[in-house]
Image (cartoon, rainbow, N blue to C red):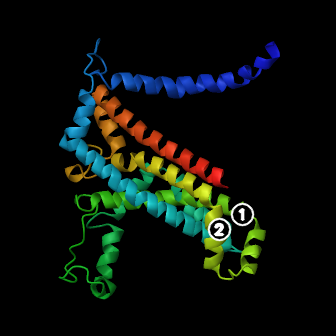
Amino acid sequence: MPGSRAYLWFIAPALILMIVILIVPIGIAGVLSVTNYSLGNASMDYVGWENFEKILTRRSYEKMFGATFRYVFVVVPLTVLLGLGAALLIHSLTRFGNLYKTIYFLPVMAALIAMAIVWEFALHPTIGIVNATLEKGCGTWLEAWGWYAQGCAKTFPLWLTDRDYAIWTVAFIGVWQGFGFNMVLYLAGLSSIPPSLYDAAEMDGAPTGWGRFRLVTWPMLGPTTVFVVTISFIRSFQVFDTVEAFYPQGGGPSKSVYVMMFAIYEKAIQQNLMGIGAAITVVFLAFVMFLTLVQRWLVDRRTHYV
C-alpha cells in the first residue's frame, strides 16, 4: 500500500544528509588511502597497503601514535574524574551553583586558539606567570617539596619547548579545557536520579555521603559515565587546535606532540600528500568506530541485565 511507505518521505532527508556528509567522504578517504594522490595531479596510482605500511613501520608515525595515546590516556581519566567531582560539588550546593557552572564551563565556550595564545604567554620561560609564581615560591613550599636540588636556582622547566614536558603541558591544557563539558553531562545525569532512592538507601543503612554515592549515585550514573568516557576519548583523539597554535611548523620538540590530527593536517594540507593523509584518517576513523562499538556494547549489556 502507498500509505505503508509514507515513512520513507520522513527519513529520506536524514538518509540523504548522512550519505552525502558521512558515507561519501569516508568512501573517498578509503579510496585515496590506497593511492599516491596529490592535489593538482591529473592522475593517481594505486599503491595498495603501502601507505598503511608506512604508518605502522616508520619512526615518525610511531611518535604520532605515542604522542596521541599519551595525550588521550592523561586527558580522558582526568576530565572524567574532575567533571564528576565538579558536578557532585555543584549539585550539592544550595547557592551560587549557576555561578560555578559558568566558571567551569567558560573554557569549553572559549576559542581554544585564543586560549592557547594566553597559555603560551603564561608558560613563557622568562616572562610567564607560571614560572614567575614558581620562582616566588621557590624559597618556601618549592624547597619543602624537594623540587630541584639547587633550591632557588630558578631553573624551571621549558614547558612548551622541552620534549620531556611538551606533551604533558598540552595534555594539562586539554584537561583544563575539557572537564567543564563532562561536568555538564554529569549534572544532567545527577538531576535525573530520583531523590527517593537516597531516602531508601539511608533507611537501608547508608547514612553517609560515600555510602549513598556507592549504592545509588554511581550505579545510576552508569549510562552517563559510558557516554562521557566515549565522548572524552573521541574529543581527545581530535585534539588539533592547541598543537597547531603552539607548533605550527611541526609536532613540537622532537615531534613529542605529533598527534594524529596534526599528522593528517601536515601530510594532506602542508605537504599535499593526500594519500598518506587519507590513510591516517582511515586509521583515526577505525579508532573512533571501535570506541563507538564498545560504548554501544556496554550500554546494551547494562540494559540487558537491568
What is the x, y in percent for residue 25? 46, 25
What is the x, y in percent for residue 235? 47, 48
Q: Which mark is residue 193?
A: 1
Compared with 184, 136 (above or below) is below
Give the residue drawn at x 60%, y 22%: 16
What is the x, y in percent for residue 136? 32, 81
Q: Quadrant of the N terminus?
A: top right
Confirm whether residue 258 shows in the render. no
Residue identified by numbered label 2: 217
The amino acid type of the residue labelled 1 equals: Ile
Which is nearer the eye, 32 or 226? 226
Give the residue drawn at x 55%, y 69%: 85
What is the x, y in percent for residue 291? 47, 45
Q: Secondary structure at mark 1?
A: loop
Q: In the image as oriented, which residue stretches furthest toward the front?
A: 305
Give the residue drawn at x 50%, y 46%: 294
Check if mark 1's residue and mark 2's residue have beta carbons within 8 Å.
Answer: yes
The amino acid type of the residue labelled 2 equals: Thr
Confirm whether residue 73 shows in the render. yes
In the image: residue 81, left or right of residue 222: left
Give the residue drawn at x 30%, y 44%: 248
Image quadrant where residue 27 sits: top left
Q: Marks 1 and 2, Cα distance to the nearest angstrom? A: 8 Å
In the image: residue 239, left or right of residue 255: right
Estimate how packed mark 1 is, as few (under 14), some (14 to 19) or many (20 or more) residues with alpha carbons within 10 Å: some
Q: Which mark is residue 135?
A: none
Estimate how packed mark 2 is, as few (under 14), some (14 to 19) or many (20 or more) residues with alpha carbons within 10 Å: some
Compared with 265, 222 (above or below) is below
Q: Does label 1 or label 2 sit earlier along the sequence?
A: 1
Image quadrant where residue 134 sits: bottom left
Which is nearer the eye, 224 or 82? 224
Q: Secondary structure at mark 2?
A: helix
